[in-house]
Image: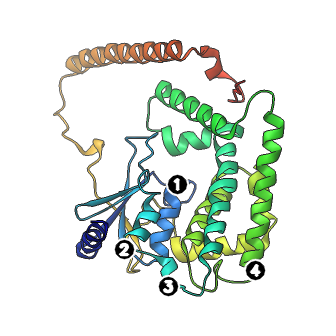
Amino acid sequence: MASAAAAAASAEWEAAERKVLVARKPCFGLPTACPTSLPVLLYLRLAEVPFDIHVDTSFPDADHIPYVEFGDCVAFNNERGGVIEYLKEEKIVDLNSKHPSVSPADVVSTKAMVSTWLMDALQYELWVVTDGSIAHDIYFSDLPWPIGKILHWKKARDVKQLLGITKLNAAEKEEEIYQKARAAYGALSLILGDQIFLFDNSPTDADALFLGHALFVLNALPDASVLRGTLQIYENLVNFVEHHKVRLLGDSSSPGLGSSTSPSSSTPRKRASAGQSYKPKPRAKKERTEEEKKFRQRSKYFLAAQLVAVLVFLSLMGVDSSELDDDDGIDYED
C-alpha cells in the first residue's frame, strides 16, 4: 500500500507541469523570510527543481506552512516530518541518495544540531530577545494590530514554555541556549572545512537546513544579535552562506525573485490584488461625504469589536492586559 502511494505521488510529481511552494512573504532581502519556509525553498533550488512561489498571509500562526503543491498532491510542513522528509521518503526528490559514500549517520547528526540547538537559539532570539518587530514583519504585518499583538504574545509564550524558560532560570537558560549554539557552529565549521558543501562537494538536505538557518540569522537578525555575532566568528561558514546565496537566490531583494531561464528559478503565482478589484464610478461630493461618515462609523464599530475580542481572550487566558504592553516584550512564567 505504501509503495503504491509513493509511486502515485512520484507519478504526480513527474506529470505536474509546475510545482508550487506556498511560503510566507519575502522580507530582509530574502525570497521568504520564514525560517521554516527558507530551507524548503533552498532544498528545491539545490535539487534544481523548477517551481513557483505563492505567498500565503492568511494563516500567520499555521504550522502547515510551508507546503508544496504538485498535481493533486500536497506535501505539508506539519505532516510526515515536513516537506523535505516527505519528498525524500516518497523518492521524489532525495539529494542524499546521490551520495552513497556519505555516512547517513553523519548527515542525521548534523541535521539534528541545526534543527535543535540552532533552531532553539533562533526561536529564542526571534520571539523572546528581540522587540518583536522582526516577527511582526514576517508573520503579522498584514493583520490588524490587536490580532497581531495577541498572536505574537501567544507564540512568545509557547516558545518560552518549549524552551523551559521561567523567571527563576531565565539567565541560566539563556547561557545554555547560546552555549549549544556556539558548539553547533564550531562543529559545523570543522565539518565544512574548505569544501563547497558540508559533505563532499555535493549538496544534502543538511546543507539546505543550515543554509536556511544561517541566511535568516545573517540577514534578518539585528547587528546586536548574539547568535549573529557568534556565527560571524566562523569565516568559512559565512563564506559558505554568501557563496550559495548568490548562486541559489541571485537578486532576492525583489519579491518572488521574478522569472529567469535558470531551471531552479521561482516565479510568484499570479493573483489579483485587492486594489485591482471593481472600482465604482465617482459620485457627487455630498454622497461621498455621507459614505465617508458611514465608513468611519463602521470602522469605529469594527475596532471596538476587536478590542472586546482581545479583552475576552485575555480574560479567558487569565492574563493581565498590561503584559502585552511590556517595553521589552518579555514575559517569563514561573
Q: Which residue is mark 2?
A: 92
Q: Callout 2 environment at 10 Å: few (<14), some (14 to 19), or many (20+)?
A: some
Kindly identify the residue that appears in the image at 69 percent across and 26 percent down.
Answer: 331
Circle 2 sits in a helix, a strand or a loop, which is it? Answer: loop
Q: Which residue is mark 3?
A: 98
- How many numbered dots are placed on residues in this image? 4
Give the mark nearest the N terminus, 4 or 2.
Answer: 2
Q: Which residue is mark 4?
A: 193
* Above or below for 234 versus 263: above
Q: Which residue is mark 1?
A: 36
Of 108 and 262, the residue lying toward us? 108
Query: What residue type is disc 4 on?
Result: Gly
Pair 1/3: label in front = 3
The answer to which image quadrant residue 111 occupies is bottom right
Kindly identify the residue that appears in the image at 49 percent across and 84 percent down.
Answer: 98
Position of 172 with respect to 67 (left or right) is: right
Query: What residue type is disc 2 on?
Result: Ile
Labelled pair 3, 4 in contact (Cβ < 8 Å): no
Give the mark nearest the N terminus, 3 or 4.
Answer: 3
Alpha-carbon span between mark 1 and mark 3:
24 Å
Circle 1 sits in a helix, a strand or a loop, which is it? Answer: loop
Alpha-carbon span between mark 3 and mark 2:
13 Å
Labelled pair 3, 2 in contact (Cβ < 8 Å): no
Labelled pair 1, 3 in contact (Cβ < 8 Å): no
Position of 267 with respect to 25 (left or right) is: left
* Quadrant in the picture for the C terminus: top right
Query: What residue type is disc 1 on?
Result: Thr
The answer to which image quadrant residue 14 occupies is bottom left
Kindly identify the residue that appears in the image at 64 percent across and 16 percent down.
Answer: 322
Q: Residue 161: horizontal and vertical position, in percent?
A: 64, 34
Position of 323 with respect to 182 (left or right) is: left
* Quadrant in the picture for the N terminus: bottom left
